[in-house]
Image (cartoon, grey):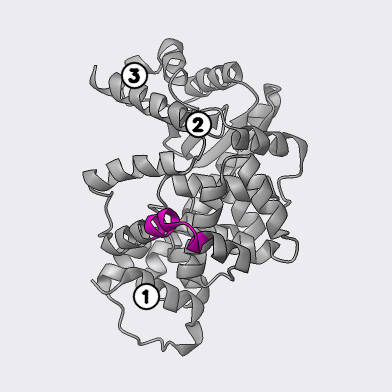
Amino acid sequence: MVNFVSQLSHRLTHSGSHEAADPIDPDFITALKYHQLVSAVQEVLPLPQLKEWQFHNLKRTKIQLLAKQYLSDFFNQNAVKFKWLKGQGLAQKLYPTQASRYASDLDVLIQSRDAVLTCAVKLIAEGWTYSNNANKNTPNHLQQHLKLHKDIPLSHPDFGTLELHYRVTAVPTPLGTAYETWLWQNNHQNLSAEEFLYLCYHGTATAYHRLKWLYDIHLYITAWSNEIDINDLLAKAHNLDCERPLLLSWYLAHQIFKTPLPETVQIRVQQSPLIRFAAKRIINHANQCRGRNPHTAYRLERRLFWYFAHKTRKHRYQIGRHLTILAWQRFK
């Protein structure tokens, strides 16, 4: 396969140099779909091979908008405080249209764990499902799930997939608390350090196995560039224990999407062999993608990125404990 990251970077940053008849590597198309960046490339340089996929994405977006309206009415009728996360909220702020960003599901933050459980039970009564096994669609199974996870995933034959969150991070962290506080107190349409740092953390903790999340970072920096005080941002990242995710994300965005890299960030990255190594691993795996979920070895390596995202021993311990409990539940 021709280097996917190089092709992607070239097509998104040098669109004027392409001819419509340029030969396209089929593996590039496959990887583009896996990384959920079809819409981003289509906005810059439409490819005939992707018209059908783009049509399906537009259809999915319309369905999600209907689901969002239905769910908003549901939460309001049940007097539940909620905020939409990621997905279409980012599309509204950063992309030309909502269909320009592929979203596989809807994410919503709800005020408490008990409220998440109550909403899940009521939605299941309205046709949503937690599991294909009908015996598991019970309050008891949902309650057990919430003891281990930050959200409850539900699916609907007409509306797709929904995740009901009571927390934005797997374990309590200063960043998660700061981002949740910002969400409850501010207009979701604004750009903020808290949201930007959360996006950096989310991408890093998942080893950016879908580069769509890194493209969000690129667009966020581009839209926010005139307001960023890099020293204040680095100080906040340090206080919230997400300095590594910030540096890695910005460096990767520069490497792949040619996002301007502030000198301060460049110096910090050059001083950290670990960050440069992490960036190299992410790019290597992006180039090896064949349109399927990563092999077992990389899934295990992604767990290490979860540790890498934190510098403090306390938070690394919490992550390790959480992963151990999940593994025990899976195999017991």
x and y percentages locating residue 267 in the rendered image: 56, 64
Q: Which mark is residue 7?
A: 1
- Secondary structure beneath dot 3 equals helix
Q: Given the image, on which type of amino acid does mark 3 rest? A: Ala
Is 258 situated left or right of 222 in this image? left
Q: Given the image, on which type of amino acid does mark 2 rest? A: His
Is 210 situated left or right of 169 in this image? left
- Secondary structure beneath dot 1 equals helix
**Residue for point 35% across, 39% down:** 303
Quadrant of image for the C terminus: top left
| Residue linked to disc 2 | 315
Which circle's residue, 3 or 1, is located before the other in the chain?
1
Which circle's residue, 1 or 2, is located before the other in the chain?
1
Separation of marks 1 and 2 at Cα, in angstroms: 37 Å
- Secondary structure beneath dot 2 equals helix
Separation of marks 3 and 1 at Cα, in angstroms: 46 Å
Give, as a single range, the part of the protein colored magenta: 269-279
Quadrant of image for the N terminus: bottom left
**Residue for point 59% across, 63% down:** 219
Q: In this picture, is 125 found above or below 323?
A: above
Graded by Cα atoms within 10 Å as few (under 14), some (14 to 19) or many (20 or more), the crowding at tag 1 reads some
**Residue for point 44% across, 55% down:** 275
Q: Given the image, on which type of amino acid does mark 1 rest? A: Gln
- Residue 165: in magenta span: no
Which circle's residue, 3 or 2, is located before the other in the chain?
3
Is 33 situated left or right of 74 in this image? left
Separation of marks 3 and 2 at Cα, in angstroms: 36 Å
Front position among marks 1 and 2: 2
| Residue linked to disc 3 | 134
